[in-house]
Amino acid sequence: MWRPEQRIKWSTRPGQWPTQEQAKTSLLFSSLTSGALEVTSRVWVPAMVPWRASLEGYVTNENIEWYRRFAESAPGAIVVEATGIRDVSSGKLLRINDDKFIDGLSKIAQAIHEASGGKTRALIQLIDFLAIKRRPSTDAFLSRFLQITQRHKDMLNLPSATEMQVRSALAKMSSSELESVLDARELESLNMGHRERVTDVHLPHIKNLPEQLPELFKTAAVRAQEAGFDGVELHYAHAYTMASFLSALNTREDGWGSSLKGRIRLPLDVYRAVREAVGSQFVVGCRLLTEEAISGGSTLEDTKFFATELGRAGVDFLSFSRGGKFEDAQQPKVLQAAYPYTGRSGYECMPQYISDELGPFGRNVQPTREIRNTLRLADLKTPVVVAGGVYDFATAEALLKSGAADIVGLARQSLADPDWSAKVRTGRGAEVRLCRYTNYCEALDARHEAVTCELWDRVNLMQDGVAKTPDGRRRLLPERDERME
Ligand SMILES: Cc1cc2nc3c(=O)[nH]c(=O)nc-3n(C[C@H](O)[C@H](O)[C@H](O)COP(=O)(O)O)c2cc1C
Ligand code: SF4
């Protein structure tokens, strides 16, 4: 994992926790209604993949209990993890690409509503992603995966060699010799694993994404509605397909890229298709990046334009993350896939306690504030969700009061202590188990292992009836605080 070279160690310093009375009159614990979005508090649990689905993408009891645990504290909304809209196998990630998934998903929506006494809105994040292959061994790449072209033959000065002859000539080359024969994309496939891009328009399934994705997102959103969710969050952030359409690196010249208008065209089409199918009473929001935080990537100015366009189109909220891209991801080990949170942009997405002078807290605040200001100047009231390093009441309340955001997302802090909302609301903020921003949870996510928090996953492991990881070494949920019941 990339870390700033300054390596300054930061620790949390929560400001004053409110009394129950102060919490009651706070902005954080006040309701908000805008469009279809009605939340009873401005505490938001952003999407976090816990790797608890079945290998086929079905909801498991572990998924249901996970979300129930977050909902018991009655935050304003919980966004259920990134859920795949396409018939693509993706390990223990949830899927919503077929009606067969509705039944299981409805149990999550129901658990959230029941456990929160109807106070928490259940949203689900809809994601599309392109293929990414594991990094191959050099041998496998040169003998099988590399497509031999005339260019290779010419580079090797073997214009009429057979494919096998070219492969065996390449196999005898050193790494630096290979660098002079393979093009940039082939080298990337060798060193990082092959990754599709939205700009690969020579591939029909990539060229046709703009025709296919509105329908795929639409049917997924309809299924979410049938499953009893209050709304969907369209995943337009991080390393995935829709964010790649928005990216400044999207140089498509077929009307679906290059200019700002070209890049926002598909995200708008997807939103409109979804809205038309689910109606005006169902929440439809988007998660965007304030900045891609990669060389040549989209800037804050680009996002101001995208946010304004989406606001004008009528989205019910805009939630802002930052970074999390493949372009600067670290090289994976052979037979492992690249992970978009390992480079500098990944650090911006989930900043860790070893940081620079800016620290891990609030790196996304100023850009989010600027985007919100742009929306308000355009007379758009779209609620804005900020996330990134928020753990205490004083900061959350100040963010709302100063107009940086309308809603505050606490992802890792909610994982560290799912009772955050209830504790703070009832004047017990001092009892919050504060996140240390170590990214132990993130490392589990990177390995596609059940996500837990180091602050609670080994506590009272031997208690009766504790659900554990298959190796029995970690509990899947934190102990219940009896006073919360
Ligand atoms: C284990 C884990 C899984 C995550 N999964 C998702 C996801 O499915 N979708 C998403 O948009 N962000 C995901 N994130 C990013 C968080 O939603 C959030 O933006 C990020 O952690 C920064 O907020 P925080 O500092 O409050 O944790 C994930 C984060 C973690 C730690
Ligand atoms: S493992 Fe726990 S303490 Fe560490 S970053 Fe994740 S939530 Fe925070």
Image: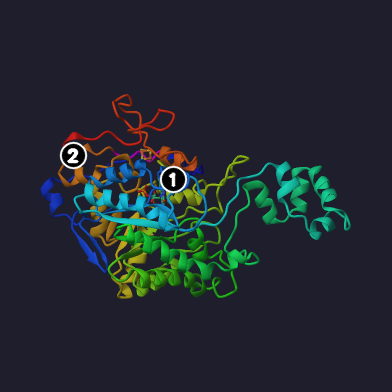
Q: How many marks?
A: 2
The disc label shown at residue 471, or none: none
Residue wearing tag 2: 484
Q: Secondary structure at mark 2?
A: helix
Q: Can residue 287 be seen by looking at this rendering?
A: no
Picture quadrant where residue 434 is located: top left
Sort mark 1 into few (<14), some (14-19) or many (20+) by Cα contacts within 10 Å.
some
Cα separation, mark 2 vs mark 1, equals 37 Å
Amino acid on which the number 2 mark rests in the picture:
Met
Please give left or right for residue 13 compared with residue 192 in the image.
left
Residue labelled with disc 1: 356
Q: Which image quarter: residue 335?
A: top right
Quarter of the image where ligand 2 sits: top left
Residue 407 lies within the magenta run: no
Query: Could you say where residue 302 lies in the image, as x and y percent from the top left?
Result: 46, 68
Q: Is residue 174 left or right of residue 102?
A: right
Is residue 436 in the magenta section? yes
Residue 205: x percent and y percent?
A: 59, 64
Q: Residue at x 45, y 42 (%)?
A: 445
Q: Is residue 86 above or below residue 259?
A: above
Q: As rendered, which of 45 and 324 lies closer to the eye?
A: 45
Q: Residues within 10 Å of mark 2 (few under 14, many from 20)?
A: few
Give the residue drawn at x 48%, y 61%.
243
Q: Quadrant of residue 276?
A: bottom left
Q: Which residues are magenta?
A: 434-438
Expressed as whole percent of the image width and height from the top left, the position of residue 389 reads 35, 48
Q: Please, what is the dominant secondary structure of the magenta stretch?
A: loop
Q: Amino acid at mark 1?
A: Asp
Residue 182 shows in this picture:
yes
